[in-house]
Image (cartoon, helix red, strand yellow):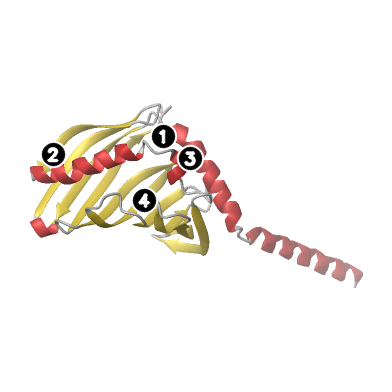
Amino acid sequence: MRAFSFIAVLITVAAGAIADNSIVQPSAIIDHFVAVSKAQQTRLQGASMEVDIEADVPKLHKSGRLHALRRISALGRITYDALRFEGDRSIKSDVIARYLTAEAESLKFKPAEHAVTPANYKFKYEGLLIADGRQVHVFHVTPRKKRVGLYVGELWLDPVTHLAVRESGRFVKSPSIFLRKVEFVRDYRIQDGVAVPTRIQTSIDTRIVGVANLSVAFSSVALAGDSE
């Protein structure tokens, strides 16, 4: 009986330990996400990738596609070398070029002002869910202030590395008086311990020509220090 009781205690303790290990601590996940996100920035500096930028304005029945080489300098500056364009030239100048300019302008802000961190956002844990055939930690994020560059929406984190695999939502403040609403989805994949972009889809509701859609696909990503 004593042996049986001892075994029963061991099983109970072991089961409790397993249960404790399975408990999700959202604050710890976010703290790790912030740490690894900051650490990977140096890996992105010096990176290069190919991009295909497609844009269309349904109301005007116009569209265009730009294929370019995107480079990130050691100082974090982003440049594009246009390789090929197909479509309406006004889409290139009025939609795609303005997107690239807006990206360059965003780099003038301090990274901490736009970073997805507890200083800028409130995080509500939605659970460990199956999305797009994989497990992800899902957080609902709400900015603490209504500021350009911040969004309300969802953040999906890889359960192993705690790196971002998706950000989606709506910007809480329009960067221009000519824009009513900007919604987006950013997808990432984990490459050598870094969350590299795979696709960005953006829907922009303008006051003049209605909705403009923009899709950016990333490929052939080469990180700094890669052998190739």
Of the numbered discs 3 and 2, the one sitting upstream in the chain is 2
Identify which amino acid the numbered label 4 is placed on.
Answer: Asp
Residue at the image point whose x is 24% and y is 54% from the top:
179
Q: Is 196 in front, or is 10?
A: 196
Identify which amino acid the numbered label 3 is placed on.
Answer: Gly
Query: Disc 2 marks which residue?
Result: 85
Of the numbered discs 4 and 1, the one sitting upstream in the chain is 1
Q: Is 227 in front, or is 74?
A: 74
Q: Is residue 189 above or below residue 58?
A: above
Task: Choose mark 3 or mark 2, whichever is in front.
Answer: 2
Q: Are marks 1 and 2 in contact (CB under 8 Å)?
A: no
Q: In the rendered image, which quarter is residue 106 located in?
A: top left
Query: Disc 1 marks which residue?
Result: 44
Identify which amino acid the numbered label 1 is placed on.
Answer: Leu
Q: Is residue 83 above or below residue 129?
A: above
Disc 3 from disc 4: Cα separation: 16 Å
Q: Which mark is residue 187?
A: 4
Q: Is 85 in front, or is 108?
A: 108
Indicate the quadrant containing the C terminus: top left, top right, bottom left or bottom right: top left
Identify which amino acid the numbered label 2 is placed on.
Answer: Phe
- Element at badge 1? helix
Query: Disc 3 marks which residue?
Result: 193
Disc 4 from disc 1: Cα separation: 16 Å
Task: Choose mark 3 or mark 4, whichever is in front.
Answer: 4
Q: Position of residue 34 (x, y in %)?
A: 53, 45
In the visual, does 121 lie left or right of 187? right
Of the numbered discs 3 and 4, the one sitting upstream in the chain is 4
